[in-house]
Image (cartoon, helix red, strand yellow):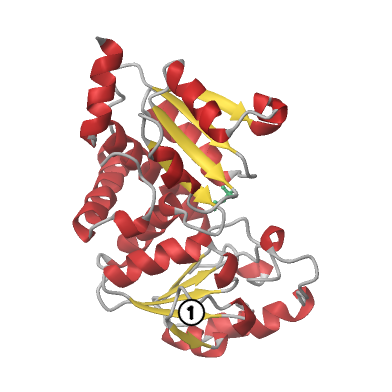
Amino acid sequence: MNSFLSMKDMSNTEIHRLIKRANEIQKKGYKPFEKQYFAANLFFEPSTRTKMSFVVAERKLGMEVLDFTAEFSSILKGESLYDTARMFESIGANLIVLRHQQENIAKELSESIHIPVINAGDGTGEHPTQCLLDLVTIYQEFGHFNGLNVVIAGDIKHSRVARSNAYALSQLGCNVYVSGNPEWRDDRLDYEMITMDEAVEVADVLMLLRIQHERHNQHEDIQVDSYLQNYGLTKQREKRMKQHAIVLHPAPVNRGVEIDTELVECKRSRIFKQMENGVAARMAVIESTLRGGAVHENNLNKRSA
Ligand code: CP
């Protein structure tokens, strides 16, 4: 593996290899890199979980973390993303972790620089490391994917998490359904649409999504008060779920909107487990990116020559 950009690029074998490695890291530990590696975390959109869990993953692997805050950088003087990334490459960064509001930009950047890029969320495009940590969480629970009913529920149209997960879960053999406000349906995700009342009956995994207020048209009418009753996980609905069914949410959670606030840490919620798994999942991706890519190895060899 070189850059890590999209779940569409991943074979089932590669996905299972990363899941296995993330589980090994958690159970058996890991060795920090012997070489000095620098990671540049370029976040152009707000993030708490993804950014902090990349920092923890990088530090656990013994990497030097080059922190970057767009608002205090030369981006404000008009420097482009490309020139910013080339600057990091020039000063010795071995890896770029990019979150950006523009769909597909991580892929575009990866094609124009010589160090690997990890997509940490590109607009409404994809969020592949979130997907990987979701897969780790599901696999820990069920030990397989084949035939599981996974309902992705909520703001599908604006969700990069929905897209990465739908691609990967269906490729891995899950039965994927979508649920939510029909206006937020996404033609790119042509899965059977069911109501939340149907979802709680059918789901082995109920994956709730945050309403992406920041991506909505200013005039779009969001009935936050009635959302929970119409499309969210209420206490009454939770009682009707299968005994073994679990609830996921990438967070941050709009408590009382997508899910009743008392259910955020209920017995079947794996929301904080997902965050815990995020560190090992990202360590597995970083290891694979830095150890696995032929192009990158050449680049490292050139650099150390
Ligand atoms: N799940 C997720 O991407 O959260 P952050 O926006 O806080 O990184």
Please tell me which residue is depicted at 42% across the width and 46% down the height of the picture: 107
Q: Badge 1 is on which residue?
A: 178
- The kind of residue on which mark 1 rests is Val
* The one of 207 and 85 positioned closer to us in this rendering: 85
Please tell me which residue is depicted at 63% across the width and 28% down the height of the picture: 79
Does the rendering let one see residue 29?
Answer: no
Q: Position of residue 250 (x, y in %)?
A: 53, 58
Which quarter of the rendered picture does the N terminus lie within? top left
Question: Is residue 269 left or right of 181 when viewed as pictured?
Answer: left
Which quarter of the rendered picture does the C terminus lie within? top left
Q: Position of residue 106 (x, y in %)?
A: 46, 44
* The one of 217 and 47 positioned closer to us in this rendering: 217
Does the rendering let one see residue 8?
Answer: yes
Q: Is residue 119 above or below residue 142?
A: above
The answer to which quarter of the image holds residue 11 is bottom left
* The one of 258 and 122 positioned closer to us in this rendering: 122
